[in-house]
Image (cartoon, rainbow, N blue to C red):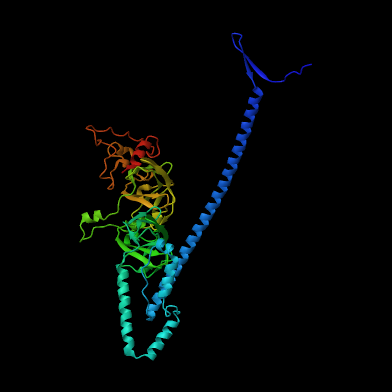
Amino acid sequence: MAKTENRWQLLLVADDGRIVPFKRIKGIALTLAVLLVILGLLCAGLGWQWTAEKVRHRKTKDLLADANRQLNHYKSEVELITAELVLAEVRMEEAGLPVTKRRERVSWQSSMKQPDTTASDEEAEKSPEEKTTPEAAPARESEKETSTPPGETAKPAETDFSSAASTAEKEKEKPAAVALGELTINHDTQKKILMARFRVNNNAPGSSKVAGKCVVVLKNDNLEPDSWLALPKVTLVDGVPDGENGRAFRISRFIDMELMAPAETDPSVFDTARVYVFDSSEDPIIEKDYPITLPPSVSAAKGESVKPSVDQPAEEAVAAAPKKAAVAVADLVLTHDAANKTLMARFRVKNAGKYSAPVAGRCVVVLKTGQEDQDSWLTMPRVTVVDGQPEGNRGQAFRISRFKDMEIKARGVADPSMYESATVYVFDTSGNALLEETIPVSLPAPPADRAAPTPATDSQEKPAEDTVTPESADKPETTGKAPDSDTAAPDPPAAAPVEDPSLTDGAAPSAREDSRSRF
C-alpha cells in the first residue's frame, strides 16, 4: 500500500471558479518565525548596548563634577597662597628688607597651562632672605645696623623707599578690577526702607571672574560718622566699612546690585552716597561718591512747619512745603441731634494719588476748643489723643479707589457750641499720618439752652434760633430771603403761647436746620 504524502497547501478560489494553489506555505511560515526571532535578539542587543552607554555617560559626568570641584578648590588655595605672599612682601617692605620684583601676574588660563614652569621660576627668583619669617626680620635688620657703618646703610634704605614709591605709583596707575555705573536710591516712606541700585562691571583684563562685596554709605560731612547709614546694615569704623560684611557678588561681565536697609533716621539729611567695593581678601578695590537728594520721611515732614520768615519770600516758603498726600478731604458737614445728644460728621475722602492705586487707612475727626487742654477736645470716633494727635491704628477704616463718603458719630454730646475748629486726620494702615486738615467750625447751642419766646413778642420779634451769631455772620440766614432767589422765603410758623418751642414737634425741623453746619 502506498504511503500518503503529508503536506500543506493553500488554495484560493476566485469569483469565476478558478482555483489558485499556494505551495510550500509551511516553509514560508518557518522563515518568518526565524526572522522574527533574529529581530528580537537584535533589539535586545541594542538595548543592552544603550544601557551600557548610559552608565558610562553617568560615570563621565560624575568624573567631570569631581574635576570641577577640585579645580575650584585649587583656585581657592591659589588665591589664599597669593594673598599670604602679598602680605609677606608688604611686611618685608615695612621691615626694610629688599624684595625681589616678581613678574607681572598672568591670567588664570596661563597659570593653569604652565604650572610647573611658573613654580620653578618663582622658586628660582626667591632669595634666602624671603624665606625667613617676618618676626626674624627686625632682628636681622638690627644686626646689620650694628655690624655695618651708618653711612653704608643709608643708600640701600633710600633705594628701598624709592622702589616702594615707584611700585605704589604703578599700582595707582593700574585700572581698577571693576567699574561702577549710575546710582539710584529710592526711599519707601510707608515701609521705611532705603534701596540703592547700581551696576558693577567687570573691568579686569581677559575673561577672568571678579568676586567681592559691595557696601553703600550715606554720609554728610557736617554730621558725625556714627550717624551715617550703611546699606546693607554693616559696622562702620570712622565712617568706613571693614570689608568683612556686605552684599557679595561674583561676575564675569556685570551684575545689577540692589542693597536695602531700614531708614532709622530721616534720610533727607544725607547729601552724599559713597560706594565701596572690596575683593575676596577684604581689600578695597574702588570707592566712588555720588551726590544725592532724598525726600524727608513722613514724621519729619509733619514735624517741620513751613512758615515764611522775614528774609524768606512767601513763594519760596510755598515751594519748600511738603508734597501733597495721596488723599484729600472735602465737604465736611457736622450735624447735631439734640434729642439723642448725637453729633455726626460727614465728609468725603478722595484718592489724590498720581496713579489710581487703591488707598486704605483710617480717619479721625477731632473737635477742638480755644483752650490747649486736650481733655476738652472731642474725638470722633472715641480714640486716645497723644501729644495733640490721635492714635493712628484706631479710627474709621476705609479703602477707596476714587472716593468714599464717610460718616462718623459721637454720642453723649450735649452742647457742641464750645468747639471752634475741626481737624480731620487720615492715617495709613501702618498708623502713619497721611493728611491733617483743620477747618474752623461754628456750631449753635442746643434748643434747650435758648430763651423761649413769649406770646407778646412772638409776633414782633425774631425767634431766638434765627439770631445771627458773630461766628455765623458770614453765613446766609436760614430764614428771610434766600441767597440765590429774588423773592423772600415764607416766615416760619409762630410757636404756641403756652408750649416751649424746643419741646414741640413743630420746632424739630428748625432745630435741625440750625444745628447743621456745612463747611
Q: Quadrant where the C terminus lies?
A: top left
Seen in the image, is 113 located left or right of residue 183? right
Q: Is residue 337 visible?
A: no
Residue, far right:
1
Residue, far top:
16
Residue 142 horizontal/vertical position (percent): 40, 87
Residue beneath the point at 30% across and 70% down:
170
Residue 28 horizontal/vertical position (percent): 63, 25
Q: Nearer the viewer, residue 363 or 237?
A: 237
Figure check: 396 above or below 244: above
Residue 110 horizontal/vertical position (percent): 40, 62
Q: How many marks?
A: 0
Report which quarter residue 127 is drawn in: bottom left
Residue, far front:
1
Q: Nearer the viewer, residue 327 or 210?
A: 210
Residue 237 horizontal/vertical position (percent): 39, 70
Q: Quadrant where the N terminus lies?
A: top right
Q: Is residue 464 visible?
A: yes
Seen in the image, is 53 located left or right of residue 376? right
Report which quarter residue 279 is drawn in: bottom left
Residue beneath the point at 65% across and 22% down:
24
Q: Nearer the viewer, residue 293 or 479?
A: 293
